[in-house]
Amino acid sequence: MNKLITTVYKNSPVWFQNLIISGYGYLIYKKRYGRLYREKLTEFLSRDYTSLEFEKQRQFSEFVRFLDFTVQNSKFYKKLYSDIDLSKISSVDDISILPVVTKELLRANIDEVYTISEKEGIASYTGGTTGKALKVLFTKEDYQIRMAYLDAFKKRLGIDPFKVKKATFSGRSLIYKKNTKIFWRYNFIYKQRLYSTFHISETNMPYYLEDLNVFKPEVLNGFVSAIFELAGYIKRHNITLKFQPQAIFTTSETLLPMHRELIEEVFGCKVYDQYASAEGAPFITECASGNLHYNLDTGIIETDENDNMIVTSFTTKGTPLIRYNIGDQIIFKEGVCPCGSSHPLVASIKGRKVDYLLSSNKLKISLSHLADVIKGNPNSVIKMQFIQDEVESLKVLLVVDRNSYCKDHEEKIMTELRYRFGANMQIELQLVEDIPKESSGKYSLIKNNLKN
Ligand SMILES: [Zn+2]
């Protein structure tokens, strides 16, 4: 939103804000769902992913076209490849003759990476752990193609993104008024209720649930942490939902087995995960058989010796990504999926550096290790956050039900933590009223403040 509209929005009553959101929604709608979108959606839906050989051929020809475009239009890549004989590339594997581009390199040269001006494109900002955001420009065409790809993924799972009522939990700032109990806005053009993730807390949760029970969404989508928190509250308080969604689509954060189990149990429907970073990485989507597939028709994903994802994404013509180290980690797995798609299977997408802590003997304690601690928690524990500022010490913030939390519970948690972090780790448990959200609207389980 531009500054003027934001100011008007901030000072308007809720009904008028809904109107602004819907008007703004209409503009986005036109940007996202034009003629190209419709053509591409039909094309993607007609694709049959059964032949690996065919998929690899298509991937190679798309790559060649994309590489060609990039060298013609991006000064940065033209210079970067000036000493490389690109005609030697005769298969996807030959991509390895090109250098890997790090985030720092991309950031430092971003103006020469762009192939379009901001006016011509659509800007997207990537959150960085360092706090420095990177601005990525998409061409309008690529934006529509990406939307079509995501919608085809949903349609294949039996969800029509236009027809269903959607409850979205994202990091958008919607609520500016203090002392309000209305933490959502409605985009009636897209049948979408936008819920603020910044205001999700034990105190506000009843209002969210009351509204969800009235709205009765058919699809939930958004941040893993927000939907997980909602599910946890519903379970702890034995709340009866007056709706059953058809599907839940999570994005933006690592979906752990503990998240999936609880969310599926509470909402009584399947969770589908997807990976598509703000930079515009190739898609990784979950199929009806519950497997994550690396979608060969959207780009190339390689891994280095540390499982870092190196991505080349065909829908990044505005800010080309070729062999870009995106900062996430990925583990592939062997096997054939019963869904029929020949696209390679992904065992897990592991998080970034911020997603692990160090034990006293410097072993990595990952999100999954901590998930086990949380799973074993007494019911009195509502929420936790693990903060590490120094290698020798760990601070754990706890939101607990003070009526039932007791010494025994504290000891149980300490035992579990000592087991993982080592006996020499100084562990401090700190009871707090709530755990603040990040500026992105996400709630992070781990805060790794260690300096390298
Ligand atoms: Zn599958």
Image: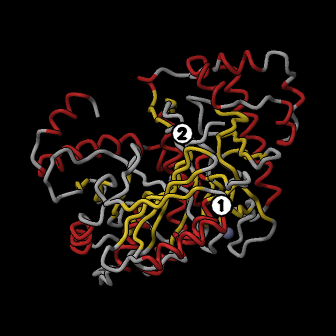
Mark 2: amino acid: Thr
The circle drawn on residue 47 is none
Residue nearest the viewer, comparing 191 with 197: 197
The circle drawn on residue 421 is 1
140 over 181 or under it: above or below: above
Q: How is the image coloured?
A: secondary structure
**Horizontal arrangement in the rendering, residue 249 relative to residue 26 (left or right):** right
Q: Disc 1 or disc 2, which is closer to the eye?
A: 1
Residue nearest the viewer, comparing 257 with 93: 257
Quadrant placement of the C terminus: top right
**Horizontal arrangement in the rendering, residue 177 relative to residue 34 (left or right):** left
Ligand 1's quadrant? bottom right
Q: Position of residue 31 (x, y in %)?
A: 39, 40
Q: Position of residue 65 (x, y in %)?
A: 71, 33
**SS at badge 2:** loop
21 over 99 or under it: above or below: below
Q: Residue at x 45, y 68 (%)?
A: 248
Q: Position of residue 110 (x, y in %)?
A: 58, 22
Residue nearest the viewer, comparing 310 with 113: 310
Q: Residue at x 61, y 43 (%)?
A: 281
Q: Earlier in the sequence, mark 1 or mark 2?
A: 2
Disc 1 crowd rating (10 Å Cα; few below 14, some 14-19, many 20+) is: many
Mark 1: amino acid: Phe
* Residue identifier under label 2: 129
36 over 257 or under it: above or below: above
